[in-house]
Image (spheres, grey):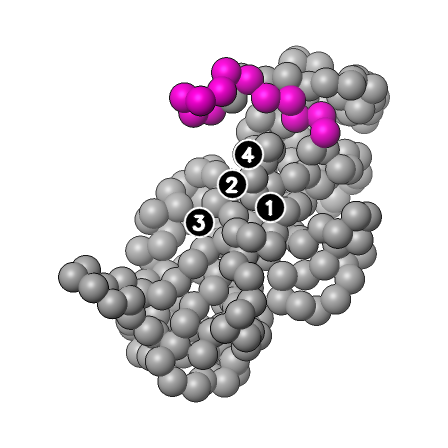
Amino acid sequence: MRLRVEYEKGRELKYLSHLQLMRLVERTLRRGEIPYALSEGFNPHVKLSLGTVLPVGVWGTAEYLDIELNRDMSPEEFIARMEGASPPGFRVKRVQKIAPSTPSLQAQVNAAAYRLSLSRDVGESTVKAALDGILKEKHLVVPARGKKRKEKDLRPGIFRLEHRRANGNLEIVAVVRVGNGESIRPDELADCLEKQEPALVVTDICRYGNYVKEADVYRSPLGLGKVEL
């Protein structure tokens, strides 16, 4: 059977790489005595697939993974076992059974929401000026990571960009494209913001949503229907 799991990678774990997070999940599965399935071949591995890579230095409150088990297990039992075996900063939140034919997370998730916290001394007018400067641009070209391309345009992949106050502090909310060659990294967006307004300093980044975007509709990867952003 296959399960789709929503979990939290807390601030304590934000400097773990994608590979290190994979190892953490595998250790937690073993400690929790989860009956995970193994691949065949000379070097069998857990049939586990994490969703869109979370950049080092960014934490997330609604991350996803798919896991294949070799026997049936209720979502409630899975959560209970993982809860007793998880290290600080890692928490399973929700679990849903999915059909064997369900597309992978990498194939489905194409949008993400980030919360960029700002330094306390930045003013609202400064933030608004930076956002207005980005949104009025037709192109937002930045150096691309990797060997094949030298630059990429972020602007088509910015679906929403706004500011708000949370607990008295200003923060920026960005909903952007992820999961393909035009995926937008939050640090790239933070660099663009600081270039618009040098006084604007991003102090913390959290990814609080991963979505399946269909036109202007956002859906949960857990199949819970439409999500209001």
Query: Do we see residue 34 in this rendering?
Result: no
Sequence-first disc among 1 and 3: 3
Q: Check contact, mark 3 vs mark 4: CB within 8 A.
A: no
Q: Residue furthest left?
A: 42
* Helix, strand or loop status at disc 4: loop
Q: What residue type is labelled 4?
A: Gly
* Helix, strand or loop status at disc 1: strand
Q: Mark 4 points at which residue?
A: 181
Cα distance in 3D space between marks 2 and 4: 20 Å
Q: Name the residue under label 3.
A: 12
Nearer the camera: disc 1 or disc 4:
4
On residue 93, the disc is none
Nearer the camera: disc 3 or disc 4:
4
- Count of all numbered marks drawn on residues in the image: 4
* Helix, strand or loop status at disc 3: helix
Q: What stretch is highlighted in magenta?
A: 145-156
Mark 1 surroundings within 10 Å by alpha-carbon count, few (fewer than 14), some (14 through 19), many (20 or more): many
Sequence-first disc among 2 and 1: 2
Q: Which amino acid does label 3 sit on?
A: Glu
Location of residue 58 in the rendering, given as x and y in whole percent from the top left corner:
51, 41
The answer to whether 223 is drawn above or below residue 173 in the figure is below
Q: What residue type is labelled 2?
A: Val
Cα distance in 3D space between marks 1 and 3: 14 Å
Q: Which amino acid does label 1 sit on?
A: Arg
